[in-house]
Amino acid sequence: MTLLSVDNITVRYGRLTALRGVSLKIEDGETIFVTGPNGAGKSTLLKAIAGVVPAAEGAIMLRGQVITGATPESTARLGFSMVPEGRHVFGALTIEENLMLGAGMRKDRARVGDDLSQVYDVFPMLKERKDKPAGVLSGGQQQMLVIGRALMTAPRLIAIDEPSLGLAPKVIDQVYETLLKLRDSRGLTLLIVEQSSTRAMMTGGRMILLRSGQVVLEGDARTLARGDTLKKAYFGYGEH
Amino acid sequence: MTALLQILFDALSLGSLYALGALGIALIFGVMRLVNFAHGDYIAFCVFALLWPSIDAAAIVFAGNLPTIILIPLILAIGAGLSVLSEILVFRRFRNANPATMMIASFALGYVLKNFLLMLFSSRPKSIDLWSNLSQQVEIAGARIPLLQVITITITIVILIALTAFLKRTRFGLEMRAAAENFTMARMLGVKANRVIMLAFAISGMLAAAIGLILATQTGTVDIQMGMSVMLVAFIATVIGGLGSLPGAVIAGFLIGGASVLMQVILPLEARPFRDAFVYGAVIACLIWRPQGLFAPKSAKQRV
C-alpha cells in the first residue's frame, strides 16, 4: 500500500527554486534514503511533506489524504513524524515533558503509558534523567531523545533529517541500530535524509539521489553502490 | 523600620503592576515573537468597560456597580475576549510576517482602540467609585499600609502562582512552553498553533484586565491614557528580563517598580522630578551590561 506519495512538487524560497518537479512514492514498511550534495533540496523535501514550507506546485498525499497545504499539526496527526536537522529538543523542558509532548494529540490514551516505558526500555539513559532539562543532554543523547519523542506520536512514518550530523561514528552506529530495531518491531516506515550515501549502502533499502532540486537517480541502495553511476550522478560528471 | 516597610510595600505594589503587564507582553512574545503595543489599550478598554453601557460625559458607573463576584470575572472575560478577538481579526493575518510588521500592526490596533474609546467617551477623565473602601489603611508591624496595596500584592502573587501551576502542570501549559521555545517543532509534534496562540492572548488579556481593575481602584478615575505608562514600563521590563523569558519579565517588573520607589526616596529633593530619568538611566546601564536581558532564555535564538 502506498503510504506517502509526492507528486511533482516544486518549492520556491523567493526567487530561489529549491525543488523542481520532485516525485516520490513510499510503500508501507519501506526504508528510503534521500541523499545528495549540499543544497540539493533534501531538507526542503522533508519540510514540504511536513507542511513547514508550502509547495508552489504539485500534490502530496499521506495515507490516501491530500496534505498539500495542510498545517504541520494536521500532517503530524496523520502519522507523519518529523525529526528535523539539528534535533530540536526543547531544552528548557524536562526529558519526560519532551517525550510526552509528542503524545498529546493521540486518541489512544491508554497506550501512551506503555509506549513511554517502551521508549525508556530502548533508551535507559533517558529514564535515568527523565526529570532533568533536555538541554543538558549530549548530542547523541539528544538524538535518542528526539527519536523517542517521534515514537511517542505513534507514527506510521518517521522522517529523519541527517541523524548522524555532528555525532561520533560509534554513536551513529547506535542510532541506526536502534532505528532499524524499532522499524522491525513497530512496522515503521523510515524516510532518512543523509548527505553521504555510505550509510544507505550499509543499511540497505531504496535510495533517492537529489541534486539541484531534482531526482537524478533512484534505486536499490546496494545495487547503486556498485559501479560508478552513483558517483557520476552525485557530482554530475559527464553532463551538459 | 516602619518607613522601610512602607517603602517595601510601595515598591512591591508598583512592581506588581509592572510585573503583570510584563507577563502579558512576554506571554504573547513567547509564542508569536510579537511585541503587542496595543496591550496598554486593552487595559484602558477594560477600565472603560466598567462604565458600560453608559457613555455619558459624567461617569455613570453601571457595570462597575455589579457585585464583585460577577464584576471581576466579567471584566477578566472582556479583557480575554478583546485580546482573542484582536488575534483572530488582526494578528492572525500577520503570523508569517516579520516581527517589525507585526509590531506596527499592534501600534495600529492600539490607535484604533484608543480612538474608539475617544469617540464614545471623550478624552475627559471621569471619576468613578470602585471599591473605594479599599483605600483605608491597615497596620502592619507599626506601619500604616493602604489595604489596596496589600490586596494588589496578594492578587499578583496568587496570579503568579496560578499561572506557574498552569504552565508546569497542565497539558496546555506544556504546549505553551514548548511553543515558546520552538514553535515549528511543537507543531510538528501535533501542537495546534491556533489553540496555543489564542490561549496566550486570552491569558494576556486577562492580565490586562486585572491591571485595569487595580488601576481604576487605585486612582478612582477612568482615563483613555490609563494603560500607557504601565505598558511602556512593562515593555521595558520584558526587554530587561530577556525577551521571551516569563520569570525574567516578572522579576524585571518588580526591579523597575523597586527602582522607581527607591529613587523617589533616596534622590535629593531637587532631583526627584527627574526620577524617571534616573530609572531609565539604570535601564540603559543594565542593557549595556547585558544586551540580551538579565534572564535571556536559550530559545531566544532565531527559530527554523
Image: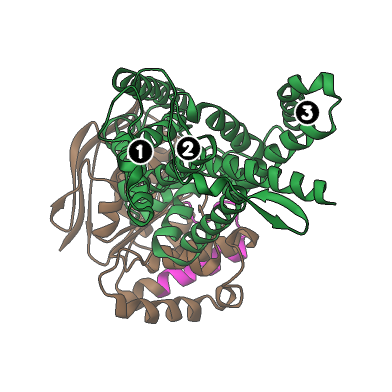
Q: What amino acid type should be assigned to the residue bearing mark 3?
A: Ala
Is residue B232 shown left or right of residue B194?
Answer: right
Q: Is residue B160 visible?
A: yes
Label 2, on which residue? B216
Is the C-beta separation of discs 2 and 1 under 8 Å? yes
**What chain letter is assigned to the residue under label 3?**
B
- List x then y, in percent, for residue A240: 35, 23
**What chain letter is assigned to the residue under label 2?**
B
- List x then y, in percent, for residue B118: 35, 19
Q: Which chain is represented by brown in the image?
A: A
Query: What is the C-alpha distance between the residues marked 2 and 1?
Result: 9 Å
How many neighbours does mark 2 have within 10 angstroms: few (below 14), some (14-19), or many (20 or more)?
A: many
Label 3, on which residue? B285
Label 1, on which residue? B50
Numbered label attached to residue A167: none
Please tell me which residue is depicted at 76% across the width and 28% down the height of the picture.
B288
Could you confirm whether marks 2 and 1 are on the same chain?
yes
Q: Which chain is represented by green in the image?
A: B
Helix, strand or loop at mark 1: helix
Query: What is the C-alpha distance between the residues marked 3 and 2?
Result: 33 Å
| Magenta segment | A162-181
Give the main secondary structure, helix, strand or loop, of the magenta stretch. helix
- Give the quarter of the image for residue B233: top right
Please tell me which residue is depicted at 50% across the width and 38% down the height of the picture.
B25
Query: What is the C-alpha distance between the residues marked 3 and 1?
Result: 40 Å
Helix, strand or loop at mark 3: helix
Residue A47 magenta? no
Tell me which colouring the rendered structure shows: by chain
Pick whichever of labels 3 and 2 is earlier in the sequence.
2
